[in-house]
Image: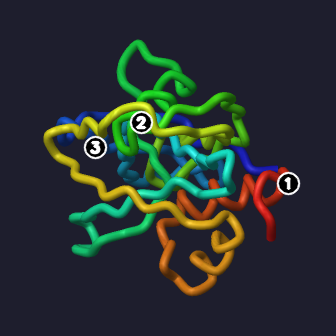
Amino acid sequence: MSRPWPEASESLLLHTRVFDIRAMRRQSPRDATLHDFYVIDAPDWVNVVAVTDDGLLVLVEQWRHGTRSVTLEIPGGMVDPGETAEEAAVRELREETGYEAATLELLGVVEPNPAIQSNRCSTYFASGCRKVADTHFDATEECVLRLEPVARAAELVTTGEINHSLVVAGLGYAWLKGKLPR
């Protein structure tokens, strides 16, 4: 059985608006040697698999600076301080798409990259979605609404049009729980 690595020291290396980076020195439980590790602390995230009553998947296209490309994703974003993941899901869906859901259900939670990140991403299934407002983007985002038949979701993933790992994981939860056709 794997064991925890005792902490020898820890320090904050970088603080940004979106994440912090910590340096950690840990002791191997196997041979007591010390090793350096780096962890990204970010707020928890949410993703929303949103479907309209007429069977359309609510998606957004947006520019991603890391890959320098436009990606196709389900709505989502950061959980704000003092906000629950469910509240963030409702807010992000409305801000990015103008849609609201009749019902919202937690599908699952993943750890995006536990080797170097401390946060979690919760995926919600939003059904009975309908357009109720204009979009309202943060200063650092701009999304384009795109509606696709839910029957195309698997094709969008397998062809690579949807390739964001957390979006694929969220859609995977929806498929595993029988919310989307395979």
Measured Cα–Cα span from mark 3 to mark 2: 25 Å
**N-term-proximal mark, 3 vs 2:** 3
Residue type for callout 2: Glu
- Residue under the image location 38 percent in, 46 percent down: 39
Residue on which disc 1 sits:
178
100 and 108: which is toward the camera: 100
Measured Cα–Cα span from mark 3 to mark 1: 38 Å
Residue on which disc 3 sits:
21
Colour mode of the rendering: rainbow
In the image, farthest residue toward the top = 82
74 and 34: which is toward the camera: 74
Question: What element does badge 3 sit on?
Answer: strand
- Percent x, y of residue 82: 41, 13
Residue type for callout 1: Gly
Q: Which mark is residue 7?
A: none
| Quadrant in the picture for the C terminus | bottom right
Residue on which disc 2 sits:
92
